[in-house]
Structures are given as structure tokens and as C-alpha cells.
Image (tube, rainbow, N blue to C red):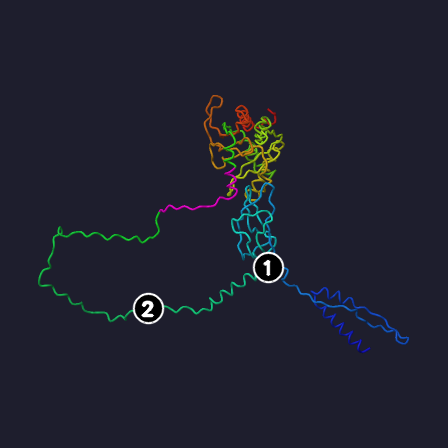
């Protein structure tokens, strides 16, 4: 009995010590597994606690899982994109947070940002800067957890320690002190004796001027030097150049011009811009009027909305209107698409353009945002352009170029008036679109923008 009591005491002591450890949940479960049994000795009932056989394990949280090194792969591209060039934003040893951009992959159409899947430290870059990658290619290795940042940053103070322990440089030799000043003289210094013979003098005409020594230039840098440097073209710029050249080689491009009186649309914007902004939360611009006018004219002239399929030698007529709006970005010109414009009003168009513009400025445009499009509008007027001929965006058949609004004298009712005028240009593929359709299309846009009531009356 005594031996069993000592065993029971040790067992309870181990269980209690396990329970005192707050982080050890398994110990609590193990201690709760002690059972009691009743044993009868000579008609007397005694209860004796017999511990069931178990094993107590103590666990302590470590940084092993948090210091795990993972490999981040290239995300999958869209169907029309096969590869891209890597441009690194971070270097080996840099600390990153979750969702922080580590690199950008520049493709033919857009840039794909690769964020960090977790907080940690960049362990290794598996692709050089500017290297080509495909979907699923390993990009970099990441050491997860905050402890990795401490491990990486620890050698820095150690490296600084030897520099701090180095003996200081010897002090510079002391400059000699000036001689002590003597007493102030009270008598004048003696006058030098006058020479007995006069000094020989020469006439001024006999003196020959000596050439001044040439000044040696002290500035080694060449002032006004003409230098040059080379920058590799990114994939987007290469693709833009390729498509524009293809358009010139494929399409028989011709441009027709007209001018639009912006008085009515400017007055309408001035009257309703505050109410529009208060209700919809976006500003009322001129793009919505031109996009809606273009959709109205494309329905009226379906040939401008069509395209030639050079493979099958057929003309493809579209029963829908998807208008690409050209947006200038630091990396190049992108053309996100506003889809289903024929069923939109001014508010819907302004919201769609505003949303696409925000994506373009934040470099968040996806390939799906720029695929398709049956017609393109390019607004060079935001940069002050007065006149220009846009280039067709293949595989489309026409493009509308907007320009700046300038006050010009025009004849109105037999009188000369100053009106805000804009030149507009339509470049079209003359293989498909005749001059009659092109001119009629541009005049339809002119009539809708000058008087939006045409849309209400379906004229």
C-alpha cells in the first residue's frame, strides 16, 4: 500500500506540474486521464487511484515553421500572353510585408504585379532583372516570419563592431605656436643709404611687352559635353511599335476632318457639373458625350464598326459597340475597352471611363480589360493638341481623334462670332469604308455633340 501511495503521489505531482504550464494543453488532457478504481479488502471498501498508463510530452513554440523558406512562382498569364520580362522592386535581404509588391512582369499588353504571399525576407532571386519568364516559372525564395528579418539584420551590428574597436587615428601634429611678440618699438627704423650713382633708366618705348602665360584650365569637366545613353525598350513599347507598323503595312489608311462647335456641350457641363458630381460622385467630362455620339454613329454606319478578316477574306459586321479609350501611361499607350456602349447613358460611360482610368494609373489593368474593342477614341486634346491624324488600332477599321478646344472666329448666321471649337479627325481603312460612310459618320458625331437633343429625338 505504501509503495502504491508513493507512486500515486509522484504521479499527481507530475500532473500538477504539467497543469501549471499554461501553454501545455496536452498536459491538461493527460492529467484528466487519471482514473480511480475501488478494491475490496476483507469486506472493507477502499478506493485507490490507479493512474492509467500515459506519456506526458512538453511542447514549446519555436520559430521553425515561421522561418520556413518558400518558393514563389510566376502567376498564370492570360491566354493571349505567353511570357514576360521581370523587373525587380526588391533585392536579396530586403524585408517585405504580406501583399507587398516584390517584382513586376512586363508583358506585351500590361504589367503583372507579383506580391509577397507572407511577411519575411527575400532569400534568393531565381531570375535576373530583365529575364524572361513564363507562367509557373520560379521567381524568388522567401523566408517567412519576423524572426528571419532579425537573423538577416543581425550581422550588420557585428560587422560594425570591429570598426568601432579599431584604434582612433593619431592626432595631427600640433602647429607651431607663433613667436612671442616683443616689446613695442619706440624709435623709427634707420633710413637706408642713398646710392652714390643714379640708377640707369630706360625709355618706355624700349621696353618690350612679355607674353602672358597661358592659363591652364583647372576644371577637368568638359562644359557642354554632348552625351547619350541607351535604354532597353520594354515589352509594351515593343508591342505598340509592332502593332502600329502592322497597321501602316496592312490598312489603306485615309483621314477626314471636321470641326465641332462645343458651345452647347460646354454650357450644359457648366450648368449641371455640380449636380452631377453631387449625385454620382464623379465629374462630368466631354469624353462621355463623344463616346455616346460615336456609339450612335456606329449603329447608323455599321461599316465603320466592321472589320476585314484577312484569313477568310470576309467582312465581319459587329452587332455590338465596344469602344476602346486610349489612355497614356508612363510605360506606354493602353486602350482599355468600354463594353456595350450602345446601351449606356452619360453617367454609365463616365463611371466606366473613371474606373478604367484609375486602374491604368495604378497599373492594375488586366489583359481582359484591353481585349476586344470595335472602335477607338484618342483624346490628344488633354495635352493641348490642335490637329493630328491618328493611326488605326488593329484589328479595328477606324479611329476618332479628338483635339484641344480653342476659341476661334466662326461664321454664325452671317455674323462672325468667337466660339469654342474643336477639330476632330477620323482615320479609316479605305479597303472597307468608303468616303461617303466616313464623312457621314463624322458629321453624325458633330451633330450629336453640338446638340445632344438629337439623341432624344433619334434623328
> How crowded is the residue under tag 2: few (<14 C-alpha within 10 Å), some, or many (20+)?
few
Q: Quadrant of the N terminus?
A: bottom right
> How crowded is the residue under tag 1: few (<14 C-alpha within 10 Å), some, or many (20+)?
some
The count of marks equals 2
Q: Residue at x 49, y 22 (%)?
A: 413
Name the foreground residue: 193 vs 29.
Answer: 29
Mark linked to residue 83: none
Q: Position of residue 140 (x, y in %)?
A: 57, 53
Q: Nearer the viewer, mark 2 or mark 1?
A: 1
Circle 2/circle 1 CB separation < 8 Å: no
Q: Position of residue 454 (x, y in %)?
A: 58, 26
Name the foreground residue: 63 vs 172.
Answer: 63
Per the image, the residue denoted by label 1 is 146
Q: Residue at x 53, y 23 (%)?
A: 436
Q: Residue at x 10, y 63 (%)?
A: 195
* Residue segment shown in magenta: 224-242
Residue farthest toward the top in the current orientation of the protein? 414
Q: Residue at x 22, y 52 (%)?
A: 212
Q: Quadrant of the C terminus?
A: top right
Q: Is residue 285 visible?
A: yes
Q: Is 362 located above or below residue 267 in the figure?
A: below
Per the image, the residue denoted by label 2 is 175
Q: Is residue 68 magenta?
A: no
- The mark that comes first in sequence, 2 or 1, is 1
Instruction: Give the distance between the C-alpha atoms of the residues marked 2 and 1, in whole angstroms.
Output: 55 Å
Residue farthest toward the right in the current orientation of the protein? 43
Q: Position of residue 421 (x, y in %)?
A: 49, 29
* Left or right of 40 in this view: 265: left
Q: Is 301 located above or below residue 60 in the figure?
A: above
The quadrant holding residue 181 is bottom left
Q: Is residue 238 magenta?
A: yes
Amino acid at each position: 500500500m505504501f509503495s502504491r501511495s508513493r507512486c500515486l503521489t509522484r504521479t499527481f505531482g507530475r500532473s500538477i506540474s504539467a497543469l501549471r504550464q499554461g501553454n501545455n494543453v496536452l498536459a491538461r488532457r493527460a492529467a484528466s486521464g487519471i482514473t480511480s478504481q475501488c478494491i475490496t479488502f476483507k469486506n472493507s471498501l477502499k478506493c485507490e487511484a490507479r493512474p492509467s498508463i500515459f506519456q506526458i510530452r512538453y511542447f514549446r513554440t519555436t520559430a521553425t515553421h515561421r522561418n520556413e523558406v518558400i518558393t514563389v512562382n510566376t502567376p498564370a498569364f492570360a491566354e493571349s500572353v505567353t511570357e514576360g520580362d521581370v523587373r525587380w522592386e526588391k533585392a536579396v535581404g530586403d524585408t517585405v510585408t504580406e501583399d507587398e509588391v516584390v517584382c513586376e512582369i512586363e508583358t506585351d499588353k500590361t504589367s503583372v504585379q507579383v506580391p509577397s504571399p507572407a511577411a519575411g525576407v527575400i532569400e534568393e532571386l531565381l531570375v535576373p532583372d530583365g529575364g524572361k519568364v513564363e507562367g509557373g516559372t520560379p521567381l524568388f525564395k522567401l523566408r517567412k516570419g519576423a524572426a528571419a528579418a532579425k537573423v538577416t539584420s543581425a550581422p550588420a551590428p557585428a560587422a560594425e563592431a570591429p570598426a568601432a574597436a579599431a584604434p582612433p587615428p593619431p592626432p595631427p601634429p600640433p602647429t607651431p605656436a607663433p613667436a612671442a611678440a616683443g616689446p613695442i618699438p619706440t624709435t623709427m627704423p634707420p633710413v637706408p643709404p642713398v646710392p652714390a650713382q643714379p640708377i640707369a633708366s630706360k625709355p618706355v618705348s624700349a621696353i618690350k611687352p612679355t607674353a602672358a602665360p597661358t592659363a591652364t584650365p583647372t576644371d577637368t569637366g568638359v562644359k557642354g559635353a554632348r552625351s547619350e545613353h541607351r535604354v532597353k525598350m520594354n515589352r509594351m513599347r515593343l508591342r505598340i511599335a509592332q502593332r502600329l507598323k502592322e497597321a501602316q503595312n496592312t490598312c489603306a489608311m485615309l483621314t477626314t476632318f471636321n470641326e465641332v462647335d462645343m458651345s452647347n456641350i460646354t454650357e450644359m457641363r457648366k450648368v449641371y457639373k455640380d449636380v452631377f458630381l453631387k449625385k454620382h460622385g464623379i465629374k462630368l467630362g466631354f469624353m462621355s458625350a463623344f463616346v455616346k455620339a460615336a456609339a450612335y454613329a456606329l449603329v447608323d454606319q455599321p461599316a465603320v464598326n466592321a472589320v476585314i478578316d484577312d484569313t477568310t477574306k470576309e467582312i465581319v459586321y459587329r452587332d455590338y459597340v465596344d469602344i476602346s479609350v486610349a489612355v497614356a501611361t508612363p510605360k506606354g499607350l493602353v486602350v482599355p475597352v468600354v463594353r456595350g456602349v450602345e446601351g449606356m447613358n452619360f453617367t454609365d460611360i463616365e463611371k466606366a471611363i473613371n474606373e478604367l482610368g484609375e486602374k491604368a494609373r495604378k497599373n492594375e489593368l488586366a489583359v481582359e480589360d484591353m481585349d476586344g474593342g470595335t472602335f477607338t477614341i484618342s483624346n490628344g486634346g488633354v495635352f493641348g493638341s490642335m490637329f493630328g491624324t491618328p493611326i488605326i488600332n488593329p484589328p479595328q477599321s477606324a479611329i476618332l481623334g479628338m483635339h484641344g478646344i480653342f476659341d476661334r472666329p466662326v461664321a454664325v448666321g452671317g455674323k462672325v462670332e468667337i466660339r469654342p471649337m474643336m477639330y476632330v479627325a477620323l482615320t479609316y481603312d479605305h479597303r472597307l469604308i468608303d468616303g461617303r460612310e466616313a464623312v457621314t459618320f463624322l458629321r453624325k458625331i458633330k451633330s450629336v455633340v453640338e446638340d445632344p437633343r438629337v439623341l432624344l429625338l433619334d434623328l
